[in-house]
Every structure is written in C-alpha cells, then in structure tokens.
C-alpha cells in the first residue's frame, strides 16, 4: 500500500506497507478534533482532491480517515450509526463530513473509516490521552461534565484495516471503534491511578450526549473483532498497556 502522511496513524500503519498494493492510505491532514483553522482545512481538502485524481487514474482504493468524535455522534439521542443523518456540532466534524461527501461523489473506489479516539505509540501531544496526561501532571484538568469518549488502541485499528482491505471491503462509510463510550471522569480516574497523581478537576457544564459509536456494521464485516476484547473494561486495558510501555508518557512530553 501507499501511505501518505508521516504522523501518528501513518507510522503505526508502516507494518502493512508491503501489503495491499491496490490501496492508497491518506493518513495526513487535520488531526485535532478541536481544530478550527480554515487554512488547515483548505490544505487537507486540496490534498484530498489531488489524491482522488491519482486513485481515479490508476484504479486503486482510497482509504480516508474521518471521525467518530462527539462532534459527529455526540448529540443526545444519537444512535451512532453510519447510515443515520448527523448534524456536526464542531468545525472539525463539519469539515470531515464534507470531505466524506467529496470522496463519495468522486467516482473513486473508496473506504471511509470514522475513527474513535485512538491511543498508542507516536501519538501527538494535542490528542486526547496525551493531553489529559499533560494536564494531570500540571495538576489541573479541564473536564466537560457529561462527556464520554470511545477509546481504541491504534494497534487494533491497524488489525481491523488489514482485514477490511484483505477482504475487499469498499464503497463503505464504516465506524472503527470499541463501541463502549466511557465517561471522561472515568478515563481521568484511571489515568490518575496509572500515573500515581491526583489533579484538580475544573468542571465545565456541557450538554450531555451518550458518545455511543455503533460497531454493528463493523462486526458484520470483520467478525474477528470479537477477539479484540471490546467490553466495558477495554479502555482500562488500553491505558494500562500503553502506560506500562511508557508510550503515552513519552507522547505527552
């Protein structure tokens, strides 16, 4: 496969570089769910247009990474399904959903993956877990009351993508997540336990949403996700494994 990008996801996909020669992976662009930069959004849109021209010309399948963040699925009552209408609540979500439409209308062979919050090696400091670790170390954490996040080990995402490409899945918008939303307070408690540090929590009231990301379609296409251990305690195992390896700590420095 050809991998475009040099960041967190691209580096974790390197073990698959020699596989799936008919795929081009676009792993570059805006990576912060709180991003609002019009310049960065435009740059990613222009990159996508050039990549779509490339895969349309040579017949390869484009894998485009979108978002399953609360900006897409965080509204109260949202079912977290790929086939239901969604109203983006953040500029980042609106941007990614707009790029999804560009891909769908392009005529190219494609696979769009809406990713939940990935955790793992090479992660950038602004992403969820490294950012929380940094705040905990500093002694004060900003908490949005009622917020939930679905954590997914990046290694599990790579395994899932490998299966999807090996089985020829295309023309799909697909959630890739654990399917278990975790209250942000629970994530913080476990991070603090792992770090041996207690921080002050400054709570901001927000409209609660269930943060649920449906994995029903994913389970149908990749039955082997049953082997990945997705359950209510999965997030604890992900945090523990990454803390044990020192990966989250290094990312946050």
Image: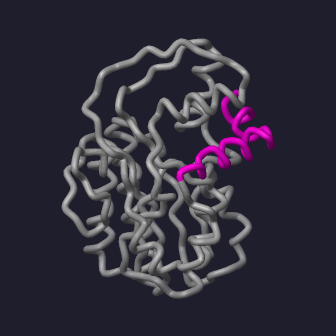
Q: Residue at x 28, y 35 (%)?
A: 208
**In the displayed structure, does residue 245 sit left or right of residue 137?**
right
Q: Residue at x 54, y 13 (%)?
A: 140
Picture layout, residue 249 above or below residue 156: above
Image coords of residue 163 (percent x, y): 59, 79
**In the displayed structure, does residue 202 sit left or right of residue 233?**
left
Picture layout, residue 139 above or below residue 251: above
Q: Is residue 246 magenta?
A: yes
Quadrant of the rendered image containing residue 102 = bottom left
Picture layout, residue 90 above or below residue 193: below
Residue found at the far front of this picture: 232
Image coords of residue 54 (percent x, y): 45, 75
Q: Residue at x 60, y 12 (%)?
A: 139
Q: Is residue 164 magenta?
A: no
**In the displayed structure, does residue 76 sit left or right of residue 226?**
left
Residue found at the far right of this picture: 245
Quadrant of the rendered image containing residue 3 = bottom right
């Amino acid at each position: 496969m050809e991998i475009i990008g040099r960041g967190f996801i691209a580096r974790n996909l390197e073990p698959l570089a020699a596989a799936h020669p008919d795929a081009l992976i676009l792993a570059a662009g805006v990576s912060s769910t709180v991003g609002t930069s019009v310049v960065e959004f435009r740059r990613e849109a222009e990159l996508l247009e050039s990549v779509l021209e490339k895969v349309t010309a040579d017949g390869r399948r484009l894998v485009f990474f979108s978002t399953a963040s609360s900006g897409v699925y965080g509204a109260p009552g949202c079912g977290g399904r790929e086939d239901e209408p969604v109203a983006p609540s953040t500029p980042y979500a609106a941007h990614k959903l707009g790029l999804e439409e560009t891909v769908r209308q392009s005529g190219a062979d494609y696979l769009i993956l809406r990713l939940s919050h990935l955790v793992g090696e090479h992660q950038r400091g602004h992403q969820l877990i490294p950012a929380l670790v940094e705040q905990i170390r500093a002694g004060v954490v900003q908490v949005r009351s009622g917020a939930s996040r679905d954590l997914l080990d990046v290694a599990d995402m790579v395994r899932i993508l490998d299966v999807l490409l090996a089985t020829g899945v295309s023309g799909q918008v697909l959630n890739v997540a654990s399917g278990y939303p975790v209250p942000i307070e629970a994530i913080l408690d476990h991070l603090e336990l792992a770090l041996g540090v207690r921080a002050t929590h400054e709570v901001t009231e927000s409209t609660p949403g269930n943060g649920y990301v449906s994995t029903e379609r994913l389970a149908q296409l990749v039955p082997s996700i049953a082997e990945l251990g997705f359950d209510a305690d999965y997030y604890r195992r992900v945090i523990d494994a990454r803390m044990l390896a020192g990966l989250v700590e290094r990312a946050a420095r």
